[in-house]
Image: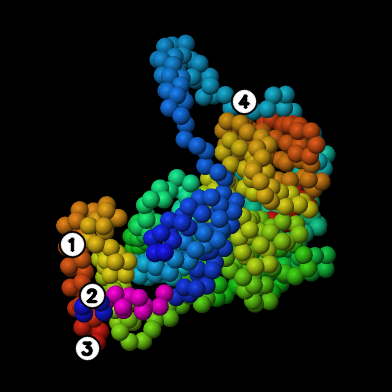
Amino acid sequence: MNEERLRNALLAEAAPDELAAGDRAWETVRAAFETREPVPRPLRYTKPLLALAFAAALVAAALTPPGRALADDVRDAVVGVDKAKPDLFSVRGGGRLIVESDAGAWVVDADGSRRLLGPYREASWSPFARFVVAARANELAALEPDGTVRWKLARPRVRFPRWGGGATDTRIAYLSGGRLHVVAGDGTGDVDAGGLPAAAPVAPAWRPGGRFVVAYADTLGRVHAYDPAGSLLWRSAPHAHPRVLAWSSDGTRLALVTADRVVVLAGSTGRPLSTRFLRGVTDATFAPRGHELAVVRAKDVLVLPDRGRPQRVFGGAGAFDGIAWSPDRRWLLVGWRDADQWVFVRVAGKRRIEAVSRVTEQFDSARFPRVAGWCCASQR
Amino acid sequence: MGVGRDERAWVRGAQAGSVSDLEALFKLHWPRAYRAAYLVCRDAAAAEDIAQESFLAAVRALDRFDRRRPFGPWLHRIVVNRAIDWSRARALRSEVALYEPAAGAEQALPSGNSHTVASALASLSTEHRAVIVLRHLLEYTPGEIAELLDLPRGTVNSRLRRGLDELGERIEEEVR
């Protein structure tokens, strides 16, 4: 075969789905372009010199015994919020929390009282917080908030159960191994959403509103919006390493967090509305009745408006873990793992910070307890 | 106005914030970027991901991009290197068979000559596929390929020679 024929053959080779793939990719690229942050101008030469001099001074200081002591102090300075309360006397902003600890899933009432539901994990509220759904290794369980078990379903490797629906009809989506399952709220009619690509280890998310629509991410990072009656509503372009899916309360937006970005997709089409390159985001949740997205990553808690620059509402040394919005959308609750504190950040009106210490001990846990839901702030 | 001048104008426009100029750049380069990724990694979904991520990398680096340089080689370097990395990683992963191709993305191979070439190309090693795609689809010279893949030129030449020999043998086997 000569070179010309080889080239023609390569050009004639149909790359599958080329036009549709191009359309999807263009929407993603356009959204990233429209929401990109301007790149800061390079530092003038005097600034690097100053930085170098400062670094040299630090190194010199660190080489002396007092300098080393100071450096150790700075390293250990994950002290948390000053004047934190020693116990969780009440939940700022009201409502009820679901918390996960080594001991299992807990329900925390507004007055701070805590009840251990049992050795469950990955618990979440039903739409009106009348029930809790939770997982064990090979079991899905629906519980009342006092711990009474309503029903159980044995399935292999159950993960991320999420309850969706309205007052009269509900569904639970969960992963069994790499498969998306959907079961009715009374535990009947469990179906493997067969034919769909394998799911990534990301909690599925129900779209708020009348119609049952569940979003899940597959192993390639594509988000699928799926009607459990059997139809695929849309599928997004791939976004590698998906971590979190979260709907806005009006169902018009779906946030996808990956290892290096936060993409907001249109709820009805999957078209990207914005793409922000933020590395290391571990959790995200929309404000109740709003489109502001709160995200948490190492050392930062940010609120991302629909348009415009992210707002840093809290920060500190060490790792943060978990974020939830109060039902009245006035407070954010952030887990500050390295300080062993829960931090309540008032984001409406004048900024205010309150904290609770010794969280790990209060939930009989060795690892830091994680806030898994604040009823009924969001429908993640 | 030639494509090169158009491209420089589009890069300049995109740097100034023009979505339509960015779209023109995208439309010019998407078909080859996607096709090159697909021919190297032989997976439509992965090719889409690789090509899309390459464009996103371009968007992120747009403000720093030197518009006197051509955009294509810069993009193709990312695409082909990512496709090679992906193919190598897939070869090492045992779970690759766990996911299925997305609906509508099944391999719609054409009949005839191009199908024969495509399936013969698929049987070559990733390294051989990459240099053949760069040389015969994207039309880079061996020297340019050496630069794009960060390889000695002799290595590129030998991979091209060996790859084309193997490709010829496979095509003969297929048409027999």
Q: Which mark is residue A225?
A: none
Q: Which mark is residue A3?
A: 2
Q: Which residue is labeled 3 in the image?
A: B176
A290 or B34, which is in the foreground? B34
- The structure residue drawn at horizontal position 24% and vertical position 87%, both measured from the top left corner, is B175
Of marks 4 and 3, the one in the foreground:
3
**Dot 2 and dot 1 residues touching (CB under 8 Å):** no
Q: Which residue is labeled 1 in the image?
A: B157
Image coords of residue A195 (percent x, y): 55, 76
**Dot 3 and dot 1 residues touching (CB under 8 Å):** no
The amino acid marked with disc number 4 is: Val
Image coords of residue B3 (percent x, y): 40, 64
For the residues labelled 1 and 4, the Cα–Cα distance comes to 60 Å
- Indicate the secondary structure of the residue bearing disc 2: helix
Q: Is residue A268 left or right of residue B56?
A: right
Neighbourhood count class around disc 4 (C-alpha, 10 Å): few under 14, some 14–19, many 20 upward: few
Dividing the image into 4 quarters, which one contains the C terminus of chain A? bottom right
Q: State which quadrant residue B167 falls in.
A: bottom left
Neighbourhood count class around disc 3 (C-alpha, 10 Å): few under 14, some 14–19, many 20 upward: few
Q: Is residue A354 above or below residue A265?
A: above
